[in-house]
Image: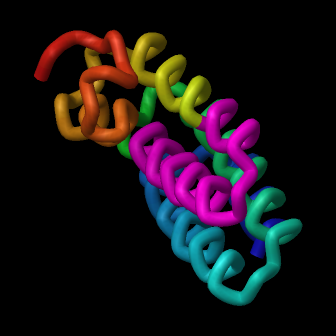
Amino acid sequence: MIEGVQQARRSRETGFGLILAAGLVNTLNQAKTEDDLAGRDALLGELRNLAQDYPNDAAVRWLLAVGLRYTLNHAKTEGNLNRRDALLVELRNLARTYPDDPSWARRYWCCRSPKFCKAPAV
């Protein structure tokens, strides 16, 4: 999966970012279900790279936020609170960096709790 995403990412075709990000998020969540934590983390890294390759695509950023949120929840379940906190900081930074993204994206990045995020109100 990761190798295919890396090859497709290089093309930077319009619309590819969303499709690739959706596939990565689904596979990332499945990796946790299969207890493949290293695979999950590699997929999250690819999702981050994809968001960098498609910097103007709010939908790709939203799916990055979804992947971060899944991983944040997994870290909490695993008792890895330092990782959870680091992922939460990453979500907050994403919201602050892109304050003009649609409100649905900001709500998700902020974990749906205003106490965690100083992004503009939605």
Residue at 51% x, 31% y is: 91
Between residue 59 and residue 69, name the one nearer to us: 69
- The magenta stretch is 60-87
Whole-percent x, y for residue 64 in the image = 53, 45
Q: Is residue 2 above or below residue 98?
A: below
Q: Is residue 95 above or below residue 68?
A: above
Q: Is residue 68 magenta?
A: yes
If the image is split into quadrants, where does the N terminus sit? bottom right
**How many discs appear?**
0
Question: Is 37 on the left-hand or right-hand side of 90?
Answer: right
**For residue 65, side relative to residue 38 (left or right):** left
Report the residue that reaches farthest toward the bottom: 34
Q: Is residue 56 visible?
A: yes
Is residue 53 shown to the viewer in this render? Answer: no
**Which residue sits at x=76%, y=82%?**
35
Q: Is residue 101 above or below residue 9?
A: above
Q: Residue furthest left?
A: 122
Q: Residue furthest front?
A: 79
Left or right, 122 with reference to 93: left
Residue 63 colored magenta? yes
In the image: residue 50, left or right of residue 21: right
Which residue is drawn at the image coordinates 63% and 33% (left, top)?
85
Magenta span: predominant SS is helix
Q: Residue at x 38, y 24 (%)?
A: 116
Q: Quadrant of residue 71?
A: bottom right
Position in image of residue 10 (x %, y %): 75, 47
- Find residue 51 and report its horizontal and vertical position in percent: 59, 38
Vertical comparison of 33 with 97: above or below? below
Q: Quadrant of the C terminus?
A: top left
Dividing the picture into quadrants, the one containing residue 73 is bottom right
